Amino acid sequence: MLRPSSWWPTWAAATTNRPASIARARSSVTDITARKRSEQIRSALYRIAATASSAEDIDAFYAAIHGIVGELMYAKNFYVALHDPATQTLSFPYCVDEYDAPPAPRPLRRGLTELVLETGEALWMPDERFGGLVAAGKVEEVGSPSVDWLGVPLKRGATTFGVLVVQSYDPRFRYGPTDKEVLTFVSQQIALALERKHAAEALRESEERYRLLFERNFAGVYRATLQGRVLECNDALARILGYDSREELMQHNAVDLYGAPGDRDHFIRRLREQRSLFAEEVTLRRKDGRMVYCVESVHLLDDEVFEGTVIDISSRKGEGTRVDAFLPLAA
């Protein structure tokens, strides 16, 4: 391991021997290397946690973490490996190595990275120990041989989904127990950042699916307050009610969209009591004043907002047909 310089603060004081009028000096020297090292580690770990909590661009995040880790240990060679259980492959989204180019995704082998992935435990592997494992056929060499290798797992709960690795090709720079502890903390922060990124991507995908359902739904879809303010609606609802655009419809209070005075009040009272209403037949008022028969289904989201779907059944109503099927809005 690369060791820090030693810090030696000194202090001195002059004294006077009054009888002989002879000035004397006293001094003291204290080694505070351990204290400074502890402060350095605390500062770096704090920055790692702060970087992880605010990470947006994952590539920039990896590079920033690499730089901070390099302040604490020899980390010239640093990589992140992620496991895809569906394809049983390893990918390397971040890899800096003075001898090997960033590897392409590859099938699992019997390397040290896979060993950490399998056991879920941190692994410190000096070359003298690694040679014995290779000779015994327990692991195989992958990439250029290093003189010291340190890998820690990236975990999601009890599942190991990746590995964080530093390695040294220079015998002057070796690792130790403190490096293992520090890198383990770093791996926890990286795992949290990746989990947040995964959750954010899942949310974006969910929102996109919702947007497509909302905009392309053949039924009218809307979200409104109990007081009648239309918060959101799709083009289908505007067409059903005879408006030129959703923006025009949203300028009206929902109270004005029901056929008879008191219809909406009755509807809202039942919604408050039951939280959801399914396939309710209602009469709504179009922009031109004509009435349209609809099936409306709604769900109360909280004490103020609900969402619903509206299907025009005017043509079927004349035939005496009841519509029991509709496309609900996903909660």
Image (tube, rainbow, N blue to C red):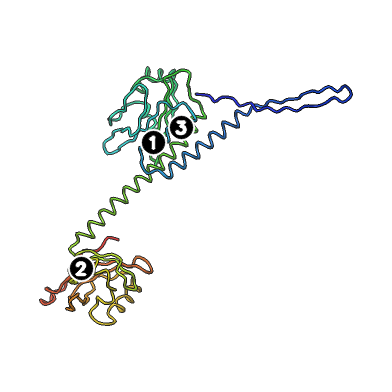
Q: Residue at x 51, y 28 (%)?
A: 177
Circle 2 SS class = helix
Can see residue 258?
A: yes
**Residue 269 image-quadrant placement:** bottom left
On the image, numbered disc 2 is attached to which residue? 238
Horizontal and vertical percent position of residue 296? 23, 71
In the image, 178: left or right of 295? right
In the image, 313: left or right of 33? left
Q: Residue at x 42, y 36 (%)?
A: 64
Horizontal and vertical percent position of residue 273? 35, 74
**Residue 218 image-quadrant placement:** bottom left
On the image, numbered disc 3 is attached to which residue? 69
On screen, residue 64 above or below 233:
above
CB-based contact (under 8 Å), mark 1 and mark 2:
no
On the image, numbered disc 1 is attached to which residue? 62
Q: CA distance from mark 1 to mark 3?
A: 10 Å
The disc, 1 or 2, on the residue closer to the chain's N-terminal end is 1
Residue type, mark 2 in image: Ala
In the image, 314: left or right of 158? left
In the image, 306: left or right of 23? left
The disc, 1 or 3, on the residue closer to the chain's N-terminal end is 1
Q: CA distance from mark 2 to mark 3?
A: 57 Å
Circle 3 SS class = helix
Residue type, mark 3 in image: Val
Horizontal and vertical percent position of residue 311? 19, 69
CB-based contact (under 8 Å), mark 1 and mark 3:
no
Circle 1 SS class = helix
In this view, the residue farthest toward the front is: 21
273 or 139, nearer to the observer: 273
